[in-house]
Amino acid sequence: MSGRVRFLPAGERALVVEFGDAIDPEINARVVGLAGSLARKPIPGVREYVVSYRSLLVMFDPMRVGERGLKLRLAWRLRASPKVDSDRAPSAAVELPVCYGGGFGPDLPDVAAHTGLSVEEVVRRHSAAVYRVYMIGFMPGFPYLGGLDETLATPRLSTPRAIIPAGSVGIGGSQTGVYPLDSPGGWRLIGRTPRRLYDAKSNKPVLLSAGDEVRFVPISAEDFERLERDESRGGSIKGAGI
């Protein structure tokens, strides 16, 4: 499903490199691959780039590189390495401990009712998948994840909540994601993770990146409180007995 790459102008200072017209792991891998190539071997004049499901937005300084010149350099790079995504070494899936249901996931019973599954089966199916981070958006660190079991798809709330606690795991339509900060939102909340997906004081403020893989690991409320304390003290949750 890779298709032909298209270069689309986005104003005078940006160029969209479009790899396809569908939400597809192969297409997204090519987007992530080109972003990784630009990170390793920057093109003079390129100021920033943003990964989306199926395209890469490349922002540039027109005083240093023109649109035509940038397009030629990007096209040459893609021809020289048509599978740039293969340059990205695979990494182990990031494990996010999640306490499902109760006050952490008030919409879990509604998801179960909508899908016709038991609460326990919803949790089992949600935590059984390996999810791909297609892109980061909406707010700093919010991962749009692909790979949700289609039987768990549930419509968003008709009236969004004014405040959703940071770490909340939700389902919105056929997607699942994690709110990294307190914010408004309309996704169905099924649980919460004590891990911080965004920390402005950290050297790496955003935990996840496009192309990463994520697994959700069910934990108890007691484990949540303990791991949250560890996280607030700056400790690592990895290997913390989850």
Image (spheres, rainbow, N blue to C red):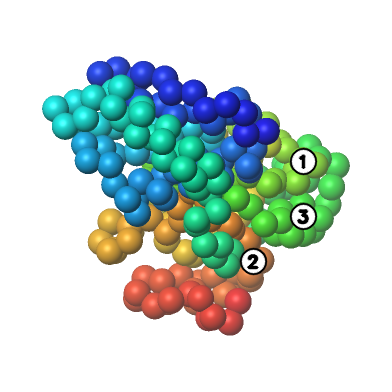
> Marks 1 and 2, how far apart in space?
19 Å
Relative to 33, residue 78 above or below: above
Q: Position of residue 225 (x, y in %)?
A: 50, 72
Q: What residue is shown at x 52% (from left), y 28% (from top)?
A: 5
Q: Residue tagged by mark 1?
A: 150
Q: Position of residue 99 (x, y in %)?
A: 61, 63
Q: Nearer the viewer, residue 28 or 117?
A: 28
The label number, if any, that marks residue 130 in the structure image: none
Q: What residue is shown at x 44% (from left), y 29% (from top)?
A: 17
The label number, if any, that marks residue 217 in the structure image: 2
Going from the N terminus, do you reach mark 1 or mark 3 first?
A: 3
Going from the N terminus, do you reach mark 3 or mark 2 first?
A: 3
Within 10 Å of disc 1 (Cα), the crowding (few <14, some 14-19, many 20+) is few
The label number, if any, that marks residue 125 in the structure image: 3
Relative to 187, residue 20 above or below: above
Is label 2 in a helix, a strand or a loop?
strand
Residue 35 visible in the snapshot: yes
Decide if residue 174 is on the left or right side of residue 13: right
Asked if the residue at tag 3 contacts the one at tag 1, i.e. Cβ–Cβ closer than 8 Å, the answer is: no
Q: Position of residue 14 (x, y in %)?
A: 31, 26
Within 10 Å of disc 2 (Cα), the crowding (few <14, some 14-19, many 20+) is some
> Marks 3 and 2, how far apart in space?
11 Å
